[in-house]
Amino acid sequence: MAEDTVQKFMIGDVEVLRVVEWQGPLAPARRLVPDSRPELWREHEDQLAPGHWQPAEDLAVAALQTWVVRSGGRTVLVDTGVGRDRERPANPRFHRRDGDLPGRLRRAGVDPADVDLVVNTHIHADHVGWNTRDAGGTWVPTFPNARYLLPAADDHHFGPEGGYGGGVRVDDRLLYEDSVAPVHRAGQARVWEGEHRIDEHLVLAPAPGHTPGSSVLRVASRGERAVFVGDLLHSPVQILRPECSSCFCLDPRQAAATRRRELERAAADRALVVPAHFAGAGAVEVRKARDGFTLHRWAA
């Protein structure tokens, strides 16, 4: 799947569009998923290569993308990518990136003014970047008519009350100030905790570990189900062995427990699992196996 490609599928009456900004090699496989054994990747090469792993270079492949969910007459964005012209000195891939998510959305038939809700599954640089845009030196919401749904635990942890992520990474302060705080100032932010029902088809639920406030978006319509899992998964290897967390997880042990719980539920419900960064087809059904789960069927 090339950049600027749109993938579309239905979950009952809910329409899902996938808008891809970038896709390619991300990092050495076991740098991305440190606890995964080399033989695990080789054993499942037929399922991982070339869409999720380049064996010759041992590089994990990923995507930067936004999911558009149309439900009950409303347009919902799930995560907003890196943004444009952001100061991200700790991450060269994101630093001053010249992206154009609004343009890609328009070409997919989604005008920014028509977006009703923005869901940030968690507050990391590649999930909140296009929350805002530069308007003559001032950051303002990119989606002027949208309500932005922010998980309370992350808003606290990465915001000033939590010391901008405890001051561990300079980028955490920068991303909060340019991509989250302006949404609060505009009165468009809604901070939620527990579970948050959006409509009859869509529910947000906590899924901590990757970050304190990591969340999933559950979709159910006419007997069909999907779950948008954010960064609970970076590679299909983590479906095969859910105990393997990514190098980006703040609490790897909790992330692994949450991952297994969500995969157990998805397998039981026959739900389509929709991670934030899978390349290739981007979403997959899973089934229970002895040690973990299997990749059953990829989205069309």
Image (cartoon, rainbow, N blue to C red):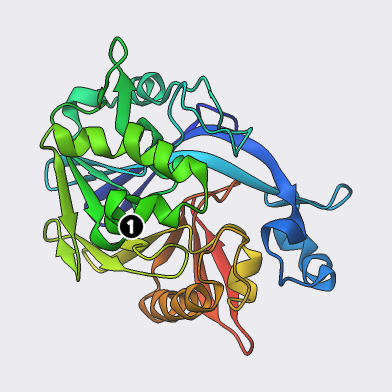
Q: Tell me: residue 134, above or below residue 16.
A: above
Picture coordinates of residue 179, whole percent (x, y): 33, 35
Measured as percent of width and height from the top left, residue 291 is found at: 64, 87
Spot occupied by residue 22 in the image (x, y as percentages of width and height): 57, 32
On the image, the x and y values in percent for residue 63 come to 57, 42
Which corner quadrant holds the N terminus? Answer: top right
- Residue that carries the numbered disc 1 in the rendered image: 162
Q: Residue at x 61, y 69 (%)?
A: 238
The tally of labels here is 1
Tell me which residue sits at (37%, 62%) in the image: 214
Q: Amino acid at mark 1?
A: Gly
Viewer-closest of 32 and 56 = 32
In the image as oriented, which residue stretches furthest toward the top?
136
What residue is at 40 percent from the left and 82 percent from the top?
A: 268
Near mark 1 (Cα within 10 A), the count class, few <14, some 14-19 or many ≥20, is: some
Q: Nearer the viewer, residue 225 or 66?
A: 66
Q: Residue furthest bottom?
A: 290
Height in image: 239 above or below 53? below
Q: Can you say whether 63 is above or below 34 in the image?
A: above
Quadrant of the rendered image containing residue 249 = bottom right
Helix or strand or loop: what does disc 1 sit on? helix
- Residue 18 in sight in this render: no
Residue 16 visible here: yes
Instruction: Please determine whether, in this image, residue 17 is positioned above or below residue 13.
Output: above
Most foreground residue, 132 or 293: 132
